[in-house]
Image (spheres, rainbow, N blue to C red):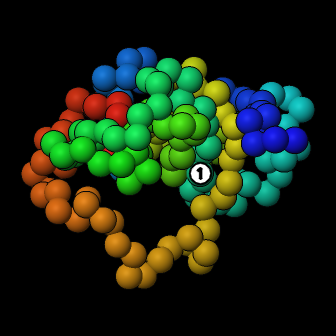
Amino acid sequence: MTLDEIRYHPIGIIHSPHRKLDEMPIQPVFAQKVAGTAVLEPAWVEGLRDLEGFSHIFLIYHFHLAAPARLSVRPPLDDNPHGVFATRAPCRPNPIGLSLVRLVKIEGPVLHLEDLDVLDGTPLLDIKPYAPRFDERTGARSGWLERVDEEKIRRRSQGGAGQGV
């Protein structure tokens, strides 16, 4: 296998009230209480065993409507260009998204979710449990985002931007 032969197959589909890119929240923290679902293909349902004990999960998905990859982007929270790898912009070399969402309940192949910032119809690639014991980091830094004032974050997070931070 060479590096250009990597292939992923969706395990399901994400459904949300977000129908347009420009109306989506820019991160799950700005989508509090926004409900939706992830519906798995039947072949993967057994893999959900014991997931109901977790309050939050990471959704890993394909940005199926992302613009072509760019190495420099202007995210909605800053007017200055940044390298795409220093942002969460969807126009990446591999358009893979990651969202930390609240898991409300599981009914068969359906995961009921909240804090969902994902576009309706997005292909789901994987699910991983959030474990504070392993995932929280004290002393973590946020690079250029530390310079963005709270008012700008509040203003630009309302109404959606659909472009990540």
Q: Nearer the viewer, residue 2 or 57?
A: 2
Q: Position of residue 52 (x, y in %)?
A: 71, 54
What SS does tag 1 mark? strand
- Above or below 157: residue 143: below
Q: Is residue 20 visible?
A: yes
Q: Which residue is mark 1?
A: 58
In the rendered image, the quadrant that contains the N terminus is top right
In terms of image quadrants, where is residue 31? top left
Q: Nearer the viewer, residue 98 or 3?
A: 3
- Above or below 101: residue 35: above
Q: Position of residue 121 (x, y in %)?
A: 57, 20
Q: Is residue 136 left or right of residue 54?
A: left
Q: Amino acid at mark 1?
A: Phe
Q: Nearer the viewer, residue 58 or 109?
A: 58
Task: Identify the residue at horizontal 36%, vertical 48% (top origin).
Answer: 83
Task: Identify the residue at horizontal 23%, vertical 29% (top origin).
Answer: 159
